[in-house]
Amino acid sequence: MTINPDLSIQFSPLHRLQWEEAQQKYVILYPEGMVELNQSSAEILKLCDGAHKPAQIVKALESKFETSGLSNDIHNFLNIALQNGWIKQD
Amino acid sequence: MAGSNKTNPTPPRWLLAELSYKCPLQCPYCSNPLDYAKYPDELSTEDWKRVLSEARKMGAVQLGFSGGEPLTRQDLVELVRYARELGYYSNLITSGYGLTEEKIVELKQAGLDHIQVSIQASSQELNDHIAGTATYQHKQQVARLVKKHGYPMVLCVVIHRENIHQMPEILQMAENLGADYLELANTQYYGWAHLNRDALLPTKEQFEEAEKIAQAYKEKVAGKMRIYYVVPDFYEDRPKACMNGWGTTFLTIAPDGTALPCHSARELPGLDCPNVKDYSISEIWNDSKTFNFFRGTEWMREPCKSCDEKHKDFGGCRCQAFLFNGDMYSTDPVCGKSPDRYRIDAAIASARELALSGTEKPLVFRNSKNSKQLC
Ligand code: SF4
Ligand code: SF4
């Protein structure tokens, strides 16, 4: 299971992405579990909204953080997220 | 506390709200205390709301509504809605008894995130025998409806000697029902399960065989159904890191408002567990005697005290130490370093003898009549 470059990415309807005030970080919530996210992972996942394809996520984040060369890191993370069921493509 | 310079403990992350001890089922492995019939009082809706908001403010985010059977509470939908407003991720842990499609929709609209349905076995006969109630057909139906209405569907099957031979069928059933998660929870021997241990504990061979089947299936359904396999610690050489450490993560509130660091802590002597009717959640979590009792490693004795694994398992489970050794400060008897390990081995041998001789030992079912008679 790997990311398809031609399809947009959605956040899984079986998980919830949420800002936690007490922890000062984003978390993913799912049945009886929770994953704490660092800032860059959270930024990527927020763009998994059904409107962005992988390359568009890279572009959006590179422009947001005024940098380049994020593609590899972002793709690696997206593959992990897909395998964990946090995101999906269809 | 005035004059105290201790740093505040980590805040609670998980809140288990045991709404009621009432339950139409009678599972002989129920983790409720044996003497639950002594505590018929239930918190009011307002009390529960205060508990939810105070715990949320401290940082609790995962919320389990359980019991007993949480559906027996008339205000369940109202509490679910309130929890959603506060930003909890809420889990309904139910036997499915009394759950209608209408209720499933209503709970969804109120913001419930997931429903965990327990099924006792993969066949009607065994399910209904263990549950002490005819519920099999209804549970299957409920599982399908949960799925139909877009919840992540979590099926929970408690594993013990009466159903462990059904492992292949249980896995198949979960897949057929379209479960997103399957929790295969080997019985933990507290409460009623402790009482029924001789009849419930599988032999080592049975356990290993079942585990092999479950692990193989895990790979087969990878990406489709997630299998959580809760191991029975009796066959391990080290105890589990019980509750992720006392008073570090989990907060349980019993139906009558008693606050517990773990759902069996009520069985421990002299803890004087505080009640949410008398104290705020932060007073209970940070300052109460109960929640500080086994926090950290100060309380430990040998062999835990000088053990280099003490930050990994925190000396194991206090309830298991008490149930087996009669001493809640002692090392969890599961541990190979514990001088009491022989007690676990004796329990295994005793259950094994019964299993191999085919002697039936009647199960004591979890109901008010038995609870009153026992305690
Ligand atoms: S384990 Fe069985 S008897 Fe106990 S609360 Fe759950 S459904 Fe009821
Ligand atoms: S002696 Fe205590 S701390 Fe060490 S492994 Fe055993 S239970 Fe854990």
Image (cartoon, rainbow, N blue to C red):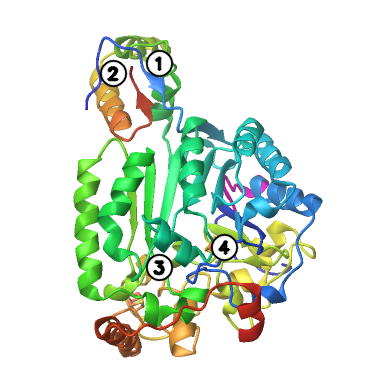
Earlier-in-chain disc, 1 versus 2: 1
The numbered mark at residue B25 is 4
Callout 1–callout 4 Cβ contact below 8 Å: no
Q: Which residues are magenta?
A: B57-65
Callout 1–callout 2 Cβ contact below 8 Å: yes
Task: Please name the residue shown 65% across and 78% down the image.
Answer: B369
Check if mark 4 and mark 3 are on a common chain: yes
Marks 2 and 3, Cα distance to the nearest angstrom? 47 Å
The numbered mark at residue A35 is none
Circle nearer the viewer, 2 or 3: 3
Tell me which amino acid carries mark 4.
Leu
Task: Please name the residue shown 75% across and 58% down the image.
Answer: B280
Q: Does the magenta-highlighted stretch encompass residue B195? A: no
The numbered mark at residue A70 is 2
Marks 1 and 3, Cα distance to the nearest angstrom? 51 Å
Residue B158 in the figure: left or right of residue B83: left
The answer to whether residue A48 is seen in the rendering is: yes
